[in-house]
Amino acid sequence: MKGFIISIITLGFLTCAPAPRYHYGEPKTPAKTQPSQKASPQKPPPMLVRGVQHTAVFTASYYGLNDGFDGKKAANGGIFNKDALTAAHKTLPFGTILKVTYPKTGKSVTVRINDRGPYIPGRDLDLSYGAAKKIGLVEHGIGQVKVTVVKWGTGETRHHE
């Protein structure tokens, strides 16, 4: 009986795990039109290098809509605002300003790196809901974007929301 109770308690803890961060960044097209997951691995996007004007192609998704992150602390110490023009990247310094262009719509937005992620394989940039909405990425959920560094950040964790 003791083992049964421990199993139930453990199961209860496992079911209380937080929801995945990228719920709203999933593609919204039917599964049959999606490329095969077993396709040959793609090369990672080119790195953006300080001191050189580079444009890279990133796979972008978005977060912040009904996923519990709005109003919570971002990785830079500031408060995440789903409507702000911000983004998450795994390594770019905090405060880096990027021009993000979505070729499918031809629209661009300027965002500031204030968070870390995305942590789903194959994704390079996670836009706030507000930034994704401005370029039309919300309708597609995920897409290829052109990224140009406008200004390099210092990497400091202070925030200017």
Image (cartoon, rainbow, N blue to C red):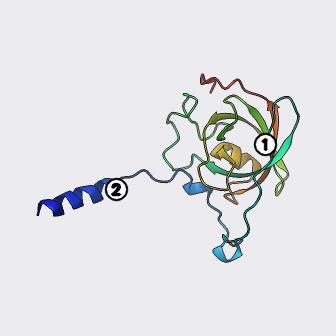
Q: Name the outermost residue toward the left.
A: 1
**Spot occupied by residue 84 in the image (x, y as percentages of width and height):** 65, 36
Secondary element at tag 2: helix
Residue nearest the observer in this picture, 102 or 53: 53
Q: Quadrant of the N terminus?
A: bottom left
> For the point 75% across and 60% down, which residue is it?
42
Q: Which residue is mark 2?
A: 14
Q: Is residue 146 above or below residue 96?
A: below
**Spot occupied by residue 106 in the image (x, y as percentages of width and height):** 85, 52
- Give the side of residue 116 with respect to residue 19, left or right: right
Secondary element at tag 1: loop
**Nearer the camera: disc 1 or disc 2:** 1
- Give the side of residue 133 with respect to residue 149, left or right: left
Q: Which residue is mark 1?
A: 47
Residue nearest the observer in this picture, 94 or 80: 94
> For the point 73% across and 46% down, which residue is it?
134
- Distance (Cα) linking label 1 and label 2: 37 Å
Residue nearest the observer in this picture, 4 or 132: 4
Three-letter code, disc 2: Leu
1 or 2: tag closer to the N-terminus: 2
